[in-house]
Image (tube, rainbow, N blue to C red):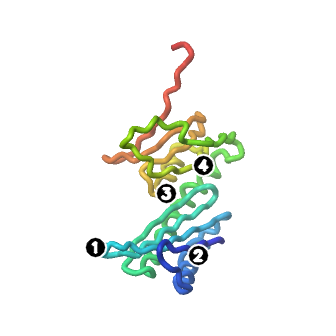
Amino acid sequence: MDITVSGRKTTVTDALRARVEEKVGEALKVFDIEPMTADVVLRYEKNPSIPEPAIVEVTVRARGSVIRVAEHGADMYAAIDLAADKVTRQLRKFKTKVVDNRQQGPSAAEVAPVPPVDDLADLLLPEEEDDLLVREKVIDITPMTEEEALVQTDLIGHDFYVFENATTGLINVVYHRKNGGYGIIKPKIESLDE
């Protein structure tokens, strides 16, 4: 199991590194999913009005899925413990919903791969003067069902998830609605007769 520990604007001491490897490593060993890697980032908020300035961000990659956890604590050790507990819960959810369900559905080898998009900027509308692109993120789009996309949305902790619909082969976006439930955005397919 590969655990990478880094600090953002803070020094990672040997004691902190040992605590991360103990707690997060213990959470990862319980599920015995291979291959699995974890990136742990330790940082402190400099704002004095925040009561829990220590932040631990854990990103686990397992079988093509990403599980992301961020926890705050009064000190770094408390935040590490909270993050390890949350990683355990998320991995349990991942194992029951994703890994066990994949055994029933088609394997990834049966679905044709989608060629990656080289530059997302080609797909963007022209910018106005007051619009600024503050972040660009490149993602791997994998074929999956709507239910699997919802699980990924929960595991990553985002409000939406972009995926290739395994049934249609088209790009879809699943999102959580403010009033509960979820929605899905699908492209309109125009027929040649229209």
Percent x, y of residue 116: 64, 43
Distance Cα–Cα, label 3 vs label 4: 14 Å
Residue placed furthest toward the bottom: 15
User: How far apart in space, not on screen, are marks 1 and 3 (Cα)?
Assistant: 28 Å
Q: Relative to 132, does residue 40 appear above or below in the rendering?
A: below
Q: Which mark is residue 194?
A: none
Residue lying at 56% horizontally and 39% vertically, measured from the top left: 165
- Mark 3: amino acid: Ile
Per the image, the residue denoted by label 3 is 156
Image disc number at residue 25: 2
Element at label 2: helix
Residue at the spot of label 4: 140
Image depth: mark 2 or mark 1 in front: 1
Mark 3 vs mark 4: give the one in front.
Answer: 4
Residue 83 visible in rendering: no
Amino acid at the residue labelled 1: Ser
Mark 2 residue crowding within 10 angstroms, few (<14) / some (14–19) / many (20+): some
Picture residue at 35% right of the left edge, 75% below the top = 52
Give amino acid for label 2: Gly
Q: Nearer the viewer, mark 4 or mark 2?
A: 4
Name which residue lies at 60% across and 49% down: 140
